[in-house]
Amino acid sequence: MARMIKSKLVLLEVPANKRDSVIEVLRSELGLEAKDAAKILGKLPRELLSSVPYEAAELIAASLMQAGAKVDVVAETGRFCDYHPHKLAKAKCKRCGKYICEIDIISAQKRLFCPECHEKNRFRRRILILLGVLIVILGAITYAALRPLFKKASQKMKTYQTRTLAFVCFANGSDPEKLGVFNKIAIPDVTSQAESIYAIPKLLSDEFARYTGVTQDIIAASILGVFLVSPENPPPSGLNQPELQKYLRDILLSEGVNPNDYELFVFVFLCRSKDLLSSGYHDSVYAVDNYALVYFPCDKPDKVGYHLASTAWAVAQLLGAKPKAPASPEEVPDDIASLRSSKDLEKTFAEISYGLKLTTQGKLAPVSSLSEVRVGYHSAYEMGWTTKAVIKEFEREHHK
């Protein structure tokens, strides 16, 4: 006896002008009420019969097709799609577990989602994209608003970190006079600090404490030298940065000093006054990245304090202060000119970036000791020691 084939009857499509005739067939063939038949047509495709003999399904299908409907009779040889009953299932929805066919997989862009879960997933992705855009916009607005605070905090943290510094003294040849000056300016004795390179870190740390209220040594310094270079190979005469950096770095390497052992290097070139590029205070100081070069004459003992001040100015540049135009007695900067009104000129200080002090007669003269030097408001601001508000208050007070 031949095995009976089970099948299902699926109503696929009904033209609008054929609805009444199809409803009538459903009533007569399936014994449905008119309202129930109308509900079936509300959502197509729709499974009408399942597990019925193939011949029976074919007879009803013929009646429906004669009424104008599009139908399909499918043999039940496997699982069918939950959304397309006439299609064999290819997989399960990985979210809800319903059976889906190749139509659903293609519609979901080759993902294993049923139509409902695919739509929910698309909606969720749109929400995530929108939230991402909002977060970026809010982040940009917040950063713009808080950037000054971040910058100030960053500068403050950087300032509070102790920096390692090396004074590298070098000279042409082995002139005893140069060695004598080195021995004088490298004395660590506290009683002579106003005439010593060792006084520079203490000066800047004291000034830092004066501006910030934080008592902390911001520089840990070492004195290296004297290193002797060939008289035929003096330092570069101009501020050619690559050439100057290479020259100074070669001095360190030739003397076995590791450039990574210190953060900042001040190269003190012991020379004669005639070797100075000019007589200007600023022209004897060059700063490039974490290197600075200072010309330090050895034949002017009375100028030691003045050139120690220029060395201190080189360190200030490495800490962030910017070079200013040279000042002359005819061209007095505002922050020094304001001191002329001081009642006690003996206690006034030279701004570190100018190296000029006021005498008791109210005239400008080069400093003779580091004890006469102070970091001015503008240099302190550039180094992150004070705020713009303090600068504005200072300018307001001295321009009344």
Image: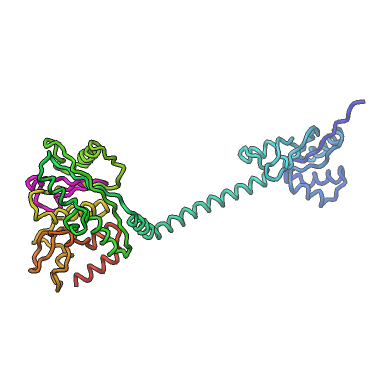
Task: Name the residue at 11% across, 61% down.
Answer: 331
**Which quarter of the figure is the N terminus placed in?**
top right
Magenta range: 267-294
Q: Residue at x 32, y 56 (%)?
A: 159
Query: Is 100 included in the stretch rendered in magenta?
Result: no
> Given the current orientation, which residue lies at the most extreme right position?
1
Q: Quadrant of residue 355?
A: bottom left
Q: Tell which of 60 and 326 is nearer to you.
A: 326
- x, y (%) of residue 287? 22, 48
Q: Nearer the viewer, residue 60 or 94?
A: 94
Measured from the top left, where is residue 369 in percent x and y?
15, 59
- Image position, residue 144 (x, y; %): 39, 57
Place residue 218 in its image quadrant. Answer: bottom left
Left or right? Give the position of 361 relative to 260. Answer: left
- The residue nearer to you, when weighing 184 against 148, is 184
Residue 376, above or below 174: below
Residue 279 sits inside the magenta stretch: yes
Describe the colour scheme in one phrase. rainbow
Considering only vertical position in the picture, is 114 above or below 213? above
Point out residue 185 in the picture as x, y percentages from the top left corner.
16, 51
Residue 166 as seen in the image, left or right of residue 279: right
Q: Name the residue located 81 percent from the left edge and 52 percent from the top edge.
A: 35
Quadrant the C terminus occupies: bottom left
* Residue placed most toward the observer, 341 or 271: 271
Q: Is residue 272 left or right of residue 2?
A: left
